[in-house]
Amino acid sequence: LSQFDFNLNATDIYNADVTPISSIETLYGITINEQLITINNITGVGTLIGPVAANINPFGIANRNTGLYTFDQTNDRILEINPNTGATISSINIGVITSGEGDLAFRSDQIGFLATGGITGSLWSFDITVPNSTLITSSMSPGIDGLAFNNNDILYGVSVPDTTIVLYTINQVTGATTIIGDSGLEHFGSVGALAFSTNGTLYTIIENNLNPKDYLYTL
């Protein structure tokens, strides 16, 4: 694993399209202060793009086709946001009511999954074209904070209740979690996020409440 650090307090990341001729990939982040940022995957440096909608307490950031999405906890909506400005493009009611910490990710067939953290958590699948959602489980153990699909549509997650960062796979039908491995990395706050690059590199962000910086790792 590798460590990078930055100080924009990003809580959720998503890996955007990769430019084949460049070694630098674009990671998008959304902060608890409702700011959209990019994160340099080589140095960990965060760059502000702009504010997202005010007072939405967002968690998660993911893409579907060319769109960028987050979850608005205040209004219980999926928001499509402009990746160049952070402005809201649309607000979508999928019928999920939840709060706390969590993440969302889209499978290659464009079906979304939304997870919440905690000692136990919940997992939904959803379709923004209907729109609707299906509760898969309300007793996922442990609850998942970071969520991401790899290129083979295997769903991975990391959890807040663990004292160290543990990577899991998640059954998309039942919500059952299976431990892949323990990174040994301690965290002092909330696990920020999980994201795969197109070449299979796995990124996570770890919040450190004892230090004003968050840390970007590859696993």
Image (cartoon, rainbow, N blue to C red):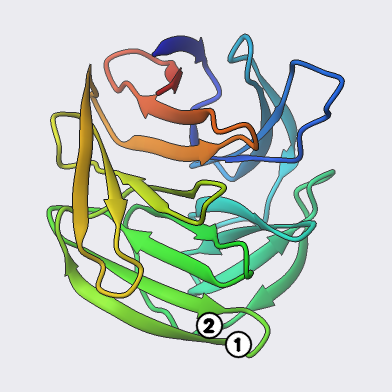
Residue 103 visible in the displayed image: yes
On-image quarter of the N terminus = top left
Quarter of the view holding residue 96: bottom left
Q: Residue 72: x percent and y percent? A: 53, 64
Q: Residues within 10 Å of mark 2 (few under 14, many from 20)?
A: some
In the picture, the quarter occupied by the C terminus is top left
Q: Is residue 217 above or below residue 142?
A: above
| Labels 1 & 2 near each other (Cβ < 8 A) | yes
Distance from label 1 to label 2 (Cα)?
5 Å
Which image quadrant for residue 48?
top right
Mark 1 = which residue? 131
Q: Secondary structure at mark 2?
A: loop
Is residue 87 toward the left or the right of residue 187 in the image?
A: right
Residue extending furthest front? 152
User: Which numbered disc, 1 or 2, marks the residue that appears first in the sequence?
Assistant: 2
Q: Is residue 12 visible?
A: no
Relative placement, left or right, of 193 versus 16 is: left
Helix, strand, or loop for circle 1? loop
Relative to 134, does residue 85 appear above or below in the rendering?
A: above
On screen, residue 176 versus residue 109, left or right, reads: left
20 to the left or right of 213: right
Residue at horizontal 38 percent and vertical 78 percent from the top = 97
User: Amino acid type of disc 2?
Assistant: Ile
- Along the viewing direction, whichever of 1 and 191 lies nearer the viewer: 1
In this view, the residue in front, 198 or 124, is 198
Residue behind mark 2? 94
Q: Residues within 10 Å of mark 1 (few under 14, many from 20)?
A: few
> Residue shown at 46%/84% (left/top)?
133
Q: Quadrant of residue 131?
A: bottom right
Tell me the amino acid under the disc marked 1: Pro
